[in-house]
Image (cartoon, rainbow, N blue to C red):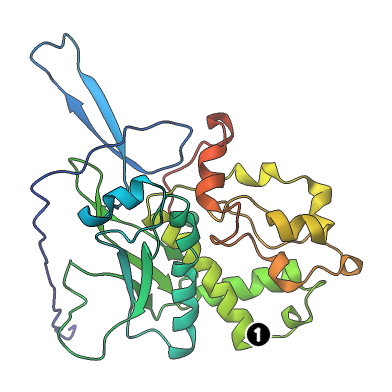
Amino acid sequence: MATPITIETNTSFIILPEQPMQRRYVDERVGYFTDWLMEYGDNQQKTKKREFLNRWRLEPKPEDMEKYKRGELVEPARPIVLYIDPATPKQWRKYLILGVNDWQPAFERAGFKNAIIAKEWPENDSMRMEDARYSFINYFPSPVANAYGPNTHDPRSGEIIQTHIGWYHNVMQLLRNWYMVQAGPNDAGARKPVFDTELMGQLIRFVSSHEVGHTLGLRHNFGSSSMTPTDSLRSKTYLAKHGHTASIMDYARFNYVAQPEDNIPRELLFPASASMTNGPLNGDISLPARLHRPTMKRS
Ligand SMILES: [Zn+2]
């Protein structure tokens, strides 16, 4: 007979804002996750589907509104704060944080500084991970080789309220295998069975940044790598300026077209980070819809 077990569960509710955020209606050229509702207006002779984006509510503080309108960088009234699960192995925490903060330059182009910040979970016991007010990157000691970036949003407006990003321990094996096979000819660090901490850390940063992108409402952008001429993948000058893919939301892997004689350094073998000049927000909104038919998969 099976041994009985005890399972502790938690349900946490959050009151939605009294004033729903203004919706931004969908435009297929912009690769965002969406929600929708059906309107049945008294004066409509048909139903009307209203589809709108999932996005965070970033607004200037009232006292900064004039500065914001003048184009000066201001901090949002409520920045996006992501905590690192305290169960996360210590050596990887800083790389997860870097992957989050890599998005800051993208928000600076929209007028906000320090719009998104990752922090270690505080030592004191006053916060609970079960509390729905907090967003965090959850660590799972699991053989699953994956990660994901969901969000919980206000169904009236698409306003993202919080997120629990997940990354499984064994995504490191996936990253190790990819990087060894794809970057091995160009990076001696990839030709070792166990990667050094800095290299694995940068690989984790890359995953963190991609999943954070989903959490910001961005879908995959499988068309972005079409913006890179294939022969430019062997040009250090081109790669330093543009990276080898226009969006971290692509499924771009590591630069396996480069040859050893091209002398491409490690950082240019990685897909463009969210912090690059031609970073994800730019790349993700500039593609025509026909190149960008995203799926609902968020891993
Ligand atoms: Zn993804």
In the rendered image, the vertical position of residue 231 relative to residue 95, given as above or below: above
Q: Quadrant of the C terminus?
A: bottom left
* Left or right of 262 on screen, residue 84: left
Q: Residue at x 46, y 75 (%)?
A: 96
Q: Residue at x 44, y 68 (%)?
A: 100
Extreme residue toward the right, this view: 261
In the rendered image, the vertical position of residue 185 relative to residue 74, given as above or below: below
Front-most of residues 29 and 69: 69
The image position of residue 6, as x and y in percent, is 13, 82
The image position of residue 134, as x and y in percent, is 23, 69
> Which quadrant of the view contains residue 4?
bottom left
Q: Residue at x 69, y 54 (%)?
A: 242
Q: Residue at x 63, y 80 (%)?
A: 199
Question: Could you tell me if residue 84 is visible in this image?
Answer: yes
Q: Quadrant of the N terminus?
A: bottom left
* Left or right of 54 on screen, residue 253: right
* Left or right of 223 on screen, residue 162: left
Front-most of residues 31 and 148: 31
The image position of residue 42, as x and y in percent, is 7, 14
In the rendered image, the vertical position of residue 232 relative to residue 7, given as above or below: above
* Left or right of 257 on screen, residue 252: left
Number of marks in picture: 1
Residue type, mark 1 in image: Phe
Where does label 1 land, which residue?
Answer: 195
Density class for disc 1 (Cα within 10 Å; few <14, some 14-19, many ≥20) is some
The image position of residue 221, as x and y in percent, is 54, 45
In the rendered image, the vertical position of residue 139 relative to residue 291, given as above or below: below
> Which quadrant of the view contains residue 128?
bottom left
Extreme residue toward the top, this view: 45
